[in-house]
Image (spheres, grey):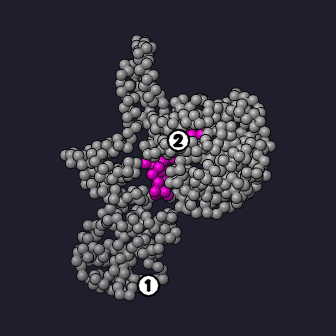
Amino acid sequence: MTNSYYRDGKKKVDFVPYKGEKMDTCATIHDEYVCCNVKVLKSVSNCPFDCSYCFLQNYLTNPQLEVVDDITRLMQEIEIKTTAQPWRFFRIGTWELGDSLALEEQTGQAKQLIEHFKDIPNAVLELKTKSNVVDPILDCVHHQKTVVSWSMNTPFIIDTEEHKTASFDERITAIKKVVDAGYLVGLHFDPMILYSDWKQDYLKCLDACRNVLPPEHVAWISIGSLRFNPEQKRLIENNFRGSDITCQEMVKGSDNKMRYVKPMRIQMYQHMMANIRRLWGENAFVYLCMERWDIWDKVMDIQPRSIGELDFMFADYFHTTFPTINPQIPNIDLYKKYQST
Amino acid sequence: MMMLSSAVDAFNNAYGSWQMDSVSDTLLNSIQSHGILVPISCIKTDDSLTIIDGFKRFRAAKHLKITHIPYAVVTTDLPPETLIFNLHQSQVCSSAMHKIRFLSALKCTIDSEHMSMVGLPYYSHIKKDIAKITALPESAQLFLHQKGFSLKEMVNLIHHSPDVFLTVLASDPFFNFSKRTLDHVVLSIINLMKRHQLTIQQIFSQTQYSEIMNKDITASQRLTQWVACINQCENPTLLAHQSSIHDALNKIELPAKLTFDTTLEHAGVTIQTTINSEKELSDFTSALSNTRLKKQLLHAVSLT
Ligand code: SF4
C-alpha cells in the first residue's frame, strides 16, 4: 500500500533518455549470502507482468514502466567499464528492475544490445525473462555472446503467482526456439516455492526443460527460494489476496529477508541439485542465488568462499566449456582482489 | 446566525455517527447542572436540522433526556464533508477507523480526493476494504479505533476472513489482547489455516484454545500459553531442529556456555567461557581435546 498505484505504472511504456550510470552490481549483494556478482544494466524499469512475490512492489519509488531509448549511450558505458577491467569476464543482465524480453516487440532494445555485445571480448549479455517473446531476436547475429535465460517455475506456481507471464508450455516452446537459433540458455529455478506437490512438480518442470535444452546449450542454472522482507510480506498479502505464498514456516535472515527455515531450503535444493546433475550431467554450471556459505557446503559440489571466487568460477567455466566466448584464462587473484568492484 | 431551540426529535445526527468516543462524565455533569450553554450548529436540510457541530452535546442531551436543545443554523456553500472535516479534523484523524467511519457517515464517494482529504491511501481494492471494515460489528470497530490500528493493519487482519478476527476478538475478555498480540494471533491463525487448509475450529483445537481458555489463570498467563502453542504449530521444523541441537549440546560436558543461532540461519556453535586461572585454562583445553567431546561437538555443529 506504500505505492498505491504500483499496478497503474505497468500499463504503458515510456521511453526515457539515458541519465546517470546504468550499469551496476546486482542490488541484492550482502556479506553473509553468496551473490554471483552479476552486473546489471538498468535499461528497463518496472515490468508488465504481475508476480505476487515481485520485489518491485516494495522497491520502485517511480512505478512508471520505462525503457531507456539511447542504446548508444548505454553501450558506451558498458564499453568503458568492460575495457577498464579487461581481465574480468562480465555477465551483464538487463533484468534487475524488470523483464528483459517482455517489451521487445515495442522497444527492440534486446535486439540492439545483442548486436553490440557480440563484439565485446570480455562480456556476455543475459536476457532473463518470464515471457515467450523470442521471435524478434531469433535472427540476430549473436556469436553466443548473449545468454537467453528463463525464470522457470512449476505450472502451478506460474498459473497462481506469476500473473500475465507466459505459461509453462509457452516458455518451453520459447526455449526450444532460442536453442535452435544457437543461443546459450540460462535457467533460474528461483524462487522455488513450497506447496503440497512441490517435489514432483519441480521434477516434472526439470524434465520438461531438459527435453528442449541439451547440456551443450546450458550457460548456467541457478536455484533459489522465495524471499522477501517483512514489509513486502504485507504488500503481497494485500496486493495478491488469493496468494498463499507467505504462509509457510519462514525465518528472518541477517539481510532482513524472510526465507523458508533452513532445513526445508536444504531439502528443496538437494532435490533440485540431484536431478539437475542427473539430467544435464556433471559439467553444467549450477549455483545458488543469495544463499549462505554453509548451505553451499551442504548442497553444492562447488564451494566458493567469496564473491570473487564464484565470479572466477563462472569465468573459468566459460573459458573451459565455451573457449570462443571467453578465450582468456581467468586469474583468480584478480577476481578476489577486485571482487567488490 | 440566529440562536433557536428545538425538540430533540427535530435533529438529525447522521453526520456525527462516525464518532466512537463516549461522552465524558464531565460533559454530562456540566449539561446536567447548567444545560447546553453553547448551541449546537446545524444545517437545514429538507425536513430536519442536520447537526454539523455539537455531536457530543447532542448525545449527552439525549442521554439526559433533555427535551429541547438550543441550536444555530449555519448557511454555507461548502459540501458537508468539507465543513465537518474542517470543524472536527483532529477527532476525525485520531484513528484510521474514525476516518473510515467519517467517510461512510458523510456518504463520501471513495475516490482519491476524499481519501487524500482524510490522509488515507487510495488503491485498487480500497472500496472493498472499506466496505468490509464498516460491515464489522460496532464493538470490533471500537476495538480497532481504541487500539489505533492503521488502515493497512486492519486490512491485514480481515482481508482473508473477518471471521477469524471476530472469533479471536470475542475471546478478548479471556486474553486481554494488546494491539500487537491480537495482530500476531490472528495472522498466525490465518497462516495456519492457509498452510494446512484447516478451519478456524481445527486450528483452535490444535492450539489447545479451549483447554487454555478454561484454565483458572490470569488473562496474561492464558495469552502466553496460547501464543506458545500457536508458535509451536507455526514452526514445527524450526522447533524440532532447535530441540535436537539442544539435546546434542546438553550431552557435552564442557566448562563453557554453548549456544547456537535459534533461527538456524547462522551455522555453528558458539562456545563462551571466562578463564580466570591457569587451572581453568588447562581444564578447558583438556576438555576440548577429548575425542568423545570433539565428536559430540562436531555432531552438534552438523545439526546447525
Ligand atoms: S517478471 Fe520479474 S520483474 Fe516482472 S513482475 Fe515478475 S518478478 Fe517482477
Residue at the outermost left position? B216
Q: Is residue A77 left or right of residue B78?
A: right
User: Tag 2, which chain?
Assistant: A
Q: Residues within 10 Å of mark 1 (few under 14, many from 20)?
A: few
What is the x, y in percent for residue A107?
Answer: 71, 58
Residue A248 shows in the view? yes
Q: Find disc 2 in the rendering and name its residue.
A: A203
Q: Secondary structure at mark 1?
A: loop
Q: Is residue A25 left or right of residue A234?
A: right
Q: Name the residue located 57 percent from the left edge and 51 percent from the top edge.
A: A168
The picture quadrant where one finds residue B284 is top left
Q: Which residues are magenta?
A: A222-247
What is the x, y in percent for residue B49?
Answer: 35, 83
Q: Name the residue located 33 percent from the left edge and 86 percent from the top edge.
A: B4
Residue A232 magenta-highlighted: yes
Q: What amino acid type is highlighted by mark number 2?
A: Leu
Please tell me which residue lies in front, B194 or A90. Answer: B194
Q: Name the residue located 35 percent from the left edge and 72 percent from the top edge.
A: B17
User: Tag 1, which chain?
Assistant: B
What is the x, y in percent for residue A187?
Answer: 62, 43
- How many circles with numbers are drawn on the protein? 2
Q: Which mark is residue B25?
A: none
What is the x, y in percent for residue A203?
Answer: 52, 41
Q: Find disc 1 in the rendering and name its residue.
A: B75
Please tell me which residue lies in front, A301 or A69. Answer: A301
